[in-house]
Amino acid sequence: MLSVTEVEKIILDLVKPLTDKEFIPLHEANNRILADNISSNFDFPYDDNSAMDGYAVKFQDVFMASEDSPVSLNIVEEIPAGYCPQKTILSGETARIFTGAILPLGADTIVIQENTQSEGCQVDIFTPPLKNDFVRYKGSFYRSGDFLLSSGSKLNPPEMAILATAQCLQVPVVRSPIIAILSTGDELITPDESMVKGKIIDSNQYLLASFIQQNGGIPLSLGIIPDNPVALENAITNALNKADWVISTGGVSVGDYDYVDEVLRKLGGKFHVKGVKMKPGKPLTVATFDQDKLYFGIPGNPVSTMVTCWRFLQTAMEKLSGRKNYRYPSIVKGITRNHLRSQGNRENYVWGNVKVVEGYYQFTLAQGSHNSGNLVNLQNINALAIIPVGTNLIEIGDDVDILLVNH
């Protein structure tokens, strides 16, 4: 059985980033992955402008100013933001200027208003500025024609603002991956069916659809498939034809009704992972079809499904989506506020919450039963503590590795 680290590497090596491109309106581009490099015809800032409210001056006029010997200047113009200056500043002159306004010709420095006193058309300067103080020069942030944003960048709020500033109204993005979801098992029913003794409501369709959407994919929910090899073969064939990846839950263990691996083999799947040394999530199957299409068979217990997504699929989805700097799971060092126990034969993940206290991450177990079928106490958690192979107990106050989730 493979270790967690080995499985992580195998999966990421198998993932081939999507390259299909589409153009979408700017207002729809948030959270998408940029498909092309973006340039602009504009310099940023567009013009020399003021970073503060104050007075635009010639440095040579005011560098000797002091409290005892202020420099008096004639105010020849007022320049609000959005106004084009009409005057050139000559020696002995200044312009009242506001934040973001264009610097008038002849001026090279801003004196902030806190260091001045004005009356009528005169202003006294009491503090000498540094040359070029509070001036933002044209092109100092970005030069026209250079790369502004790089392909493979995720479009978060700052990138969205940059695209708007560049007037990029149609944004080239990588096509969102389509990921099919199958739930297997005769015991499953949908949430709108009447509850019958022995049946279980299928929560994994909703768990996985939410996870896929949060990570930039399009979920294709294909419903519940009974424990029947023919039905399962038809469903998997349909899913492989429609989606970039397929994720199924249940049917990958060693029970008499677990047919997923048998069907994958019949359909020509190449197996890369058959179990991982972790808890929860041990019976994990990873197979490929036509090299690029991945199939993930995940155990059906909902906590196992969620932990598998956080540990392996989140990073893999980022790579699939075309993000160049895709993020590995965020694992930090901290201390535990509870005893953490494990049988020691697998890498064990226990869930709870972490907060920073006096500069240290502190982990607290979620209350209630830590069972892979107990979805209830998974709500509102933000961390998984990792008990390594060979460790049976991590005592209160001891160091522990913590996987940050839901951040």
Image (cartoon, helix red, strand yellow):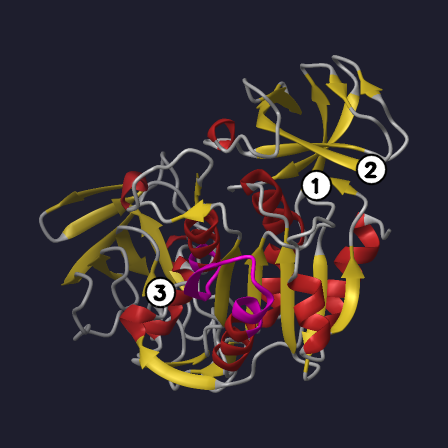
**In the image: residue 406, left or right of residue 109:** right
Check residue 221 for magenta coloring. yes
| Mark earlier in primary sequence (2, 1) | 1
Q: Residues within 10 Å of mark 1 (few under 14, many from 20)?
A: some
In the drawing, what numbered circle is on residue 331?
1
Residue in view at x 78 percent, y 61 percent? 273
Q: Residues within 10 Å of mark 3 (few under 14, many from 20)?
A: few
Q: Nearer the viewer, mark 2 or mark 1?
A: 2
Q: Which residue lies furthest to the right in this view?
A: 390
Q: What residue type is labelled 3?
A: Ala
The residues tagged by marks 2 and 3 sit, at their Cα atoms, a distance apart of 46 Å
| Mark earlier in primary sequence (3, 1) | 3
Magenta region: which residues? 213-233
**In the image: residue 176, left or right of residue 357:** left
**Residue 167, position in %: x, y?**
30, 79
| Mark earlier in primary sequence (2, 3) | 3
Residue in view at x 49 percent, y 67 percent? 180
**Residue 202, position in %: x, y?**
44, 46
Q: Residues within 10 Å of mark 2 (few under 14, many from 20)?
A: many
**Residue 4, position in %: x, y?**
79, 49
Q: Which of 128 and 399 is in front in this view?
A: 399
Q: Which amino acid does label 1 sit on?
A: Ile
Residue at numbered disc 2: 346
| Residue 265 versus residue 359 in the image, above or below | below
The residues tagged by marks 2 and 1 sit, at their Cα atoms, a distance apart of 18 Å
- For residue 168, say whether it is visible: no
Check residue 218 for magenta coloring. yes
| Residue 2 versus residue 370 in the image, above or below | below
Secondary element type, mark 3: helix
